[in-house]
């Protein structure tokens, strides 16, 4: 059927439209809609790489249509730092359920305006809840917040004789509403941003006597992140009698003790006449409202045109917003968490943070866009805000506070967010460079906006895993360049940019020469410390760059010692160098600043102490690093002997030569202690380099005869496969043999999947060689990251007896004997103990063989999880409980079968942190207590529960929150200190010693994306860690407390469930002891997966699917004689599954995950987990 042609516009419109669009492009005001696929999480979306590339190149979107999330296998996950869903309520289970229930009941209606028939009980209940939140008599809903501001401004201007005064940075909805009012005869005046003196001047000079006056302002300004001076406005209102209208869009639910907004936070709610708000920010919904008196509501119902002549909010939206209000009231910890994370971001970037909106002003428009696009390529959407939204010269990056999943995630995400901080700071560095281009010192230019130098420094040193692998990806040239750029810029700040920089080095005693030497040394030592953590991942080019920089200044090195001893030189350098060195050292080794201060040293003396220590460390590590790049270090070399002494010192053994050398230097006993602590940290086994979840390495293998026939290029039948693999994030090695080896090495170092596209037959030996090379490099990196220098790193069995081997993926196709070659090669690899699988792709055409390509995507995910598990550390606080007779495998069994390493932590580390000399500050404890008691009354249980016979907690006092809060703070500290992905604590030792428990602490850690369990059950800890890595779901470890075999139902019970899994909860006590703080909550009905890892070799898996039953709170189903949170699950397998559980149990705990994941987990277990060895 022929499509109708577009109607032709009247004469002249074509030219006007084309000229208008061209003008928008020329003024950099042209924008394009960029569709994404929404993620299951509120802070994620998905885009194809083609769409991302089009976005970066400022081209229209590449995709004609977008798949659903379920089908979005070829899309990249993007972390969204651009949303306004501050509390994460848009995807809260209660909010989603409320919307779904309302939609099922009445569809998407009613479809008319509120006055005509669109006003329902849901709308009335929502208005009442919002009025209560704002402390007003009533409230009126609007379709959007924009519509609410338009209605208010236009309604105020009825009758004339009115002056509207508006802050110059007010939102566009206020501006447009005021402009509409001016058309109705209002006098519109704009006062300078937050300038109350200017406002009062206008009130006194520009407002005619007898005229009505209204002041319109945002409470929290969305582009600058600053608050209006509401207290000052309230005082002016008292003196001048104007109407105060406050748009509290960004502050509602985020500010104030109850979430009432900025006015509540500042104690002036009763001085605000009209509270305008939106449901599209922290509520996670859509709509607007005006909270006001009953009389104002009556007036707006009849005069607010955007409400009178617009369809009312759909009932599902109103129901969801009402649920959001209730969740925010029940879970104030969400609001508190936002502010804690805001403070963390401010500390990381070195910028003042007073709200959930964090702008980083860059300045030049194009550089801001470049930085934003660079972040997008790395998977972070941090939008560039440009004119006309902000004034020219103040373009900025704007990050909202979606941090609940981003910042608290473990493993790769933590390091990627750490890189985000660094990338933002590198953007700040561009401003310094811009200032130098203009002939101005960059620091002086930046001082007029915000401390960008401090921002860069803070970002470079603040991330807690800075020293453990920052230079372990392809981004290290950027990081090293920015660091060296920083040092050179610092030197340039003190001199005119037109001077010849080499003049600085002619006089060895010149302060600037000393600064340059110390700064360069500082940069090199930081680099080398990072190298020591991950030596096999640093490129040789970066090493050459460092060596060359040092060599270029070597001729003047003797002058440095004399200059350092000159008393007149230290003073002009002390402030800068102390900041550079002490900030890094304090961040990397907490307590260093206190250690130095306790010696009563001046800042100048501190500078000398640290510089001597860093010179010593650099002198040892630099030759070691150079030799490492050439291959194994000879055991007879002086470098090897130095390393042996370092490791002995770190282990607490005697190292007389080294200690004597240290004490003989200028650094003395203080530096000796610092060196000892630092070296101990360096050789401690640590995590692997971060995995890039969005890419993988692969090589295309061809037999020599086929290469000759094709002239070395790829045959045509392989080109579609290569193109589609590239679209999935595949990084292909060039077709030369050595480059394929390099791809294998890189994948092993970066802990990424490695695949081989078997181009033809005759490649069997190539496959074996590459697999062995990949294995050896993985083992080399593993030993190096454990602080070891194994001489046998190039031997065939580098990882040792019984070690696991990284999985290898073979990709086969129907041409040139690819599949037969893959089958033969994999058979030999499996004989040698390698994990791996063949993925057969019958076609590479778009839309063809989707199941096969989905299988490849699933296998890639499995390999990523395999590497993630092998980078994980499970901390066991105290010995496992004595009753766990089947759940405490050895560390060797855990490492060989699943990969994580076990870290034994003495219980005294926990108890000492609670009541020892390092107890926590009062404010910290109070904040945790407030969070702990949110959502439920601080009591043991209800009276009805207590009346039941045999309740062990009946008559117990109210929960003792403070001791439990200290347990959380101490456990959180242990997680950070030991770099743990998972922690399990023997709670009954805490009960015995301190009469409290760790139930609340473990629940909160789970909400912070730290896998947490109790009593040292290693099997459950493994299951939780694996389940979360595979599914992204928050796990719950629970007892199987009761079973109902005829109905195929099991009852789970435990006190340590994450609050994010509950629709409601209350703070109660631990079941068995009646002490501490535990959670009694309600789990919403829905699909779940139960799993349990067990067996002597951890090679057995119990895995079943089911549904949480709704009647869990029904009469008689909750028992006071079980752990507090109780859930009944109906298993899909029915009675046979329950009978099998009773006959062949693997232990007393199971792990529950939301959703059905049996197929996914079973596939991993058999292909890459212990099930592989069992099948073999």
Image: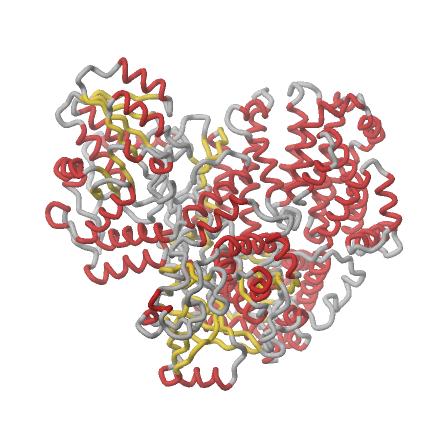
Q: Residue at x 23, y 32 (%)?
A: 13
Instruction: Tell me, yes or no, if residue 849 can be seen here.
Output: no
Name which residue lies at 41% across and 42% down: 59
Locate the C terminus and report the quarter of the image it occupies. bottom right
In front: 599, or 1075? 1075
From the viewer's side, name the closer residue of 1087 and 240. 240
Is residue 98 left or right of 1033 when viewed as pictured? Answer: left
Q: In front: 1144, or 36?
A: 1144
The image position of residue 62, as x and y in percent, is 40, 49
Q: Residue furthest front?
A: 955
Quadrant of res 147:
top left
Position of 587 relative to 993 (above/below) = above
Q: Is residue 449 visible?
A: yes
Q: Tell how many labels.
A: 0
- Left or right, 463 with respect to 1044, comes to right
Query: On the picture, is 531 further left or further right than 1078?
Result: right
Res 557 → quadrant: top right
Residue 79: percent from the left, percent from the top?
46, 49
Q: Residue 277 at what x, y percent from top left? A: 29, 40
Q: Residue furthest left?
A: 116
- Residue 828, compared with residue 571, is above or below; it is below
């Amino acid at each position: 059927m022929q499509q109708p042609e577009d109607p032709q516009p009247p004469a002249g419109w074509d030219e006007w439209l084309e000229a208008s669009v061209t003008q928008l492009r020329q003024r950099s005001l042209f924008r394009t809609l960029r569709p994404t696929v929404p993620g299951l999480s509120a802070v994620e979306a998905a885009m194809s790489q083609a769409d991302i590339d089009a976005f970066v190149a400022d081209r229209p979107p590449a995709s004609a249509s977008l798949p659903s999330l379920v089908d979005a296998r070829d899309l990249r996950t993007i972390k969204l730092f651009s949303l306004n869903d501050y509390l994460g309520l848009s995807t809260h289970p209660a909010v989603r359920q409320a919307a779904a229930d309302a939609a099922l009941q009445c569809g998407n209606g009613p479809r008319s305006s509120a006055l005509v028939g669109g006003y329902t009980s849901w709308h009335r209940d929502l208005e009442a809840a919002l009025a209560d939140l704002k402390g007003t008599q009533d409230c009126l809903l609007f379709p959007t917040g924009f519509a609410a501001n338009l209605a208010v401004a236009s309604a105020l201007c009825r009758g004339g004789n009115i002056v509207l005064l508006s802050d110059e940075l007010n939102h566009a909805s206020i501006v447009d509403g005021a402009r509409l009012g001016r058309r109705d005869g209002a006098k519109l005046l704009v006062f300078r941003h937050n300038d109350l003196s200017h406002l009062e001047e206008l009130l006194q000079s520009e407002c005619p006597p007898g005229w009505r006056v209204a002041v319109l302002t945002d409470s929290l300004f969305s582009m600058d992140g600053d608050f209006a001076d509401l207290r000052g406005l309230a005082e002016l209102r008292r003196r001048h009698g104007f109407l105060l209208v406050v748009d509290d869009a960004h502050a509602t639910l985020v500010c104030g003790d109850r979430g009432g907004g900025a006015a509540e936070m500042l104690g002036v709610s009763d001085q605000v006449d009209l509270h305008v708000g939106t449901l599209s920010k922290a509520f996670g919904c859509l709509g607007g409202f005006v909270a006001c008196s009953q009389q104002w509501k009556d007036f707006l119902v009849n005069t607010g045109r955007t409400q009178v002549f617009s369809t009312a909010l759909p009932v599902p939206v109103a129901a969801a917003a009402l649920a959001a209000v209730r969740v925010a009231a029940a879970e104030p910890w969400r609001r508190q968490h936002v502010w804690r994370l805001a403070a963390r971001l401010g500390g990381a970037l070195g910028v003042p943070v007073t709200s959930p909106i964090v702008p980083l002003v860059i300045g030049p428009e194009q550089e801001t866009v470049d930085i934003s696009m660079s972040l997008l390529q790395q998977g972070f959407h941090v939008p560039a805000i440009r004119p006309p939204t902000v004034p020219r010269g103040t373009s900025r990056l704007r990050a909202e506070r979606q941090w609940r999943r981003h910042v608290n995630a473990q493993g790769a995400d933590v390091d990627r967010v750490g890189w985000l901080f660094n990338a933002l700071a590198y953007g700040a560095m561009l401003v310094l460079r811009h200032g130098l281009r203009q002939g101005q010192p960059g620091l002086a230019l930046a001082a007029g906006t915000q401390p960008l130098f401090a921002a860069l420094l803070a970002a470079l040193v603040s991330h807690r895993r800075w020293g453990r692998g920052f230079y372990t990806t392809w981004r290290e040239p950027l990081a090293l360049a920015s660091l060296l750029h920083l040092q050179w810029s610092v030197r340039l700040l003190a001199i005119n940019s037109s001077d010849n920089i080499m003049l600085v080095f002619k006089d060895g005693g010149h302060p600037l020469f000393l600064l340059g030497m110390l700064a360069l040394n500082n940069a090199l030592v930081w680099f080398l410390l990072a190298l020591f953590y991950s030596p096999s991942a640093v490129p040789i080019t970066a090493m050459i760059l460092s060596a060359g920089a040092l060599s270029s200044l070597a001729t003047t090195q003797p002058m440095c010692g004399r200059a350092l001893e000159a008393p007149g030189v230290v003073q002009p350098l002390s402030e800068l160098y102390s900041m550079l060195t002490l900030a890094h050292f304090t961040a990397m080794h907490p307590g260093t600043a206190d250690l130095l201060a306790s010696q009563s040293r001046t800042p100048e003396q501190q500078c000398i102490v640290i510089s001597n220590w860093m010179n010593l460390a650099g002198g040892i590590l630099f030759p070691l690093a150079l030799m490492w790049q050439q291959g194994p270090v000879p055991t007879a070399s002086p470098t090897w002997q130095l390393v042996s002494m370092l490791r002995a010192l770190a282990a607490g053994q005697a190292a007389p030569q080294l200690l004597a050398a240290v004490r003989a230097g200028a650094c003395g006993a203080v530096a000796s202690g610092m060196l000892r602590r630092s070296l101990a940290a360096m050789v401690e086994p640590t995590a692997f380099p971060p995995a890039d979840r969005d890419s993988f390495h692969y090589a295309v293998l061809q037999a020599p005869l086929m290469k000759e026939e094709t002239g070395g290029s790829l045959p045509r039948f392989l080109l579609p496969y290569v193109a589609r693999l590239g679209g999935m994030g595949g990084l292909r090695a060039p077709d030369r043999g050595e480059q394929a080896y390099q791809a294998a090495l890189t994948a092993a170092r970066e802990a990424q999947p490695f695949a081989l596209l078997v181009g033809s037959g005759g490649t069997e030996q190539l496959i074996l060689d590459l697999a062995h090379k990949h294995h050896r490099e993985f083992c080399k990196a593993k030993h190096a990251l454990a602080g070891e220098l194994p001489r046998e790193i190039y031997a065939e069995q580098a990882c040792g007896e019984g070690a696991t081997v990284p999985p290898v993926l073979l990709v086969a196709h129907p041409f040139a004997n690819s599949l037969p070659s893959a089958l033969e090669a994999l058979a030999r690899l499996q004989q040698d103990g390698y994990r791996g699988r063949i993925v057969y792709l019958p076609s590479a055409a778009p839309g063809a063989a989707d199941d096969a390509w989905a299988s490849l995507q699933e296998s890639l995910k499995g390999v990523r999880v395999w590497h993630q598990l092998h980078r994980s550390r499970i901390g066991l606080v105290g010995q496992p409980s004595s009753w766990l007779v089947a759940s405490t495998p050895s560390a060797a069994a855990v490492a060989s079968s699943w990969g994580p390493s076990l870290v034994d932590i003495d219980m005294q580390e926990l108890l000492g942190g609670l009541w020892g000399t390092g107890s926590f500050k009062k404010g910290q404890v109070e904040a945790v207590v407030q969070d702990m008691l949110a959502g439920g009354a601080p009591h043991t249980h209800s009276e009805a529960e207590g009346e039941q016979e045999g309740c062990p907690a009946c008559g117990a006092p109210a929960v003792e929150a403070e001791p439990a809060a200290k347990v959380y703070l101490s456990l959180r500290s242990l997680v950070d200190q030991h770099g743990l992905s998972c922690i399990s604590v023997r709670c009954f030792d805490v009960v015995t010693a301190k009469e409290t428990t760790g139930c609340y602490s473990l629940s909160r850690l789970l909400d912070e994306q730290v896998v947490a369990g109790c009593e040292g059950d290693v099997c459950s800890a493994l299951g939780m860690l694996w389940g979360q890595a595979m599914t992204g779901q928050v796990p719950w470890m629970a007892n199987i407390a009761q079973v109902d075999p005829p109905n195929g139902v099991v009852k789970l019970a435990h006190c340590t469930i994450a609050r994010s899994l509950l629709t409601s909860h209350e703070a109660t006590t631990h079941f068995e002891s009646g002490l501490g703080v535990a959670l009694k909550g309600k789990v919403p009905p829905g699909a779940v997966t139960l799993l349990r890892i067990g067996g002597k070799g951890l090679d057995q898996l119990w895995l079943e699917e089911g549904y949480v039953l709704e009647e869990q709170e029904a009469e008689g189903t909750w028992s006071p004689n079980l752990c507090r949170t109780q859930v009944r699950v109906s298993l899909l397998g029915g009675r046979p599954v329950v009978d099998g559980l009773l006959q062949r149990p693997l232990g007393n705990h199971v792990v529950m995950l939301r959703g059905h994941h049996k197929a996914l987990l079973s596939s991993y277990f058999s292909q890459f987990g212990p099930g592989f060895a069992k099948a073999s």
